[in-house]
Amino acid sequence: MAKLAALKAPYDIVVKDYPIPQPQEDSLVIKIEAACVCGSDLHLTSMDLPRRYPGVIGHEFAGRIVAMGKRAPETIHCYGGDMKVGDRIVVYPHIACQKCSICMTYGNGNCSCENDWIYGGTMMDKDDRLNHDPDLYPHFKGGFGEYVHIFPNTFVWKLPDDMPSKIAALLDPLAVAMRAVEQTMTSVGGYGEGLSTNSKALIIGAGPIGVMCGMILKTMGVEQLIISDMLDKKLEMAKEISGADVVLNVSGLSCEEKVQKVFEVTGGTGANIVINCANHPSSIVEGLQMVAVLGHYVEIGNAVSFGRIINTELCLSKVIFERNAHITSVVANGPATFDRAFRLLKRHKEIPFAKLLTHEFHSLDDLLPTIKMMRNEDYLKGVLVFEE
């Protein structure tokens, strides 16, 4: 028997014992070593969305293989060579159907798959096997448990010996940041100024993904990195971890004042790259006005509505089209981007990923209290670490 956390109702997480599953011929089982708390875990925990309760949670996790079916090396896609019992792996949390129009057009693994299933997604039940009901075998289908059953058609990465599992568990949010940055990569000198060594980049929101976007942009050599937020403590941590050139506390400023401040620090041009990681609709209207002519705007924080209805008014011609801006969001992602993010994680000894992990806990009973800390000024990322 082993422990598993499941969402029973809004702000109600129950920890129960279930039989440790055995792998089927085409699957494997890992013992969890670390699992990170995502911002979406707060949304899923706090909002009364249409769903079936209880549901397993947690999609950012890494662990050690303890049992394998004989066909698992064929059915599970492993970066880094053949798997064996005892290897540590980190998991791409999406399983695509390989049959829908998205999969047929863009390849296996695209998380925009029409039938996408996510480990720890709480409410995305596909069939008798791929579901989030903890009471149905194999029970362990999310990262917030002592084990996870890894289904066929999952993408995984073998961990180097020197990579702590809690660093590996950052792969999913880092890949979101990586995808945002990748969408700004255009031909230098073309009509649309994206990522280059003369880019002025603005990150709106100093949460973990915003800071990771800044870390990537700094590593790739942008001329100026600006991060804005409304909390001094968040900005202090963001500057230390990402190496931002400018941090802006925009608390109490009007939309016009925020836009003016960004144009001031960029020398009057606006930002060539704006990546919005703030989870408030007003930040969209503000961010779009901070983009330089022929710049790029990427939406992360409001890319998924989580059931909210967002109504706003703005002059599209003035805010968007007169600038000839490239506007996109991070919803689609895939294993190739995750692999590029994983390669960056391998540099954890020189890039301070560990500083993102501000709230470490060691028991599933502390999961809900940690989720409730997410809006604290000193919080960036919570991580569950099971100690031997």
Image: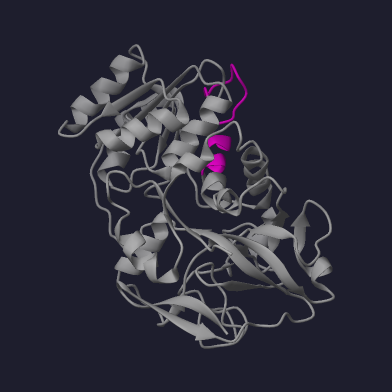
Q: Is residue 186 magenta?
A: yes
Residue at 29 percent across and 15 percent down: it is: 264
Is residue 79 left or right of 94 when viewed as pictured?
right
The residue sitting at the top extreme is 267
Residue at 38 percent across and 43 percent down: it is: 207
Indicate the position of residue 75 as horizontal and vertical percent values.
Answer: 79, 69
Colour scheme in the image? one colour
Relative to 88, does residue 27 appear above or below in the rendering?
below
The span shown in magenta is: 177-193
Q: Quadrant of residue 269?
A: top left
Residue at 64 percent across and 36 percent down: it is: 347
Indicate the position of residue 259 as horizontal and vertical percent values.
Answer: 26, 26
Is residue 82 left or right of 265 when viewed as pictured?
right
Is the stretch drawn in magenta largely helix, strand or loop?
Answer: loop
In depth, the one of 12 and 334 nearer the eye is 12
Q: In which quarter of the image is residue 200?
A: top left
Residue 82 visible at all: yes
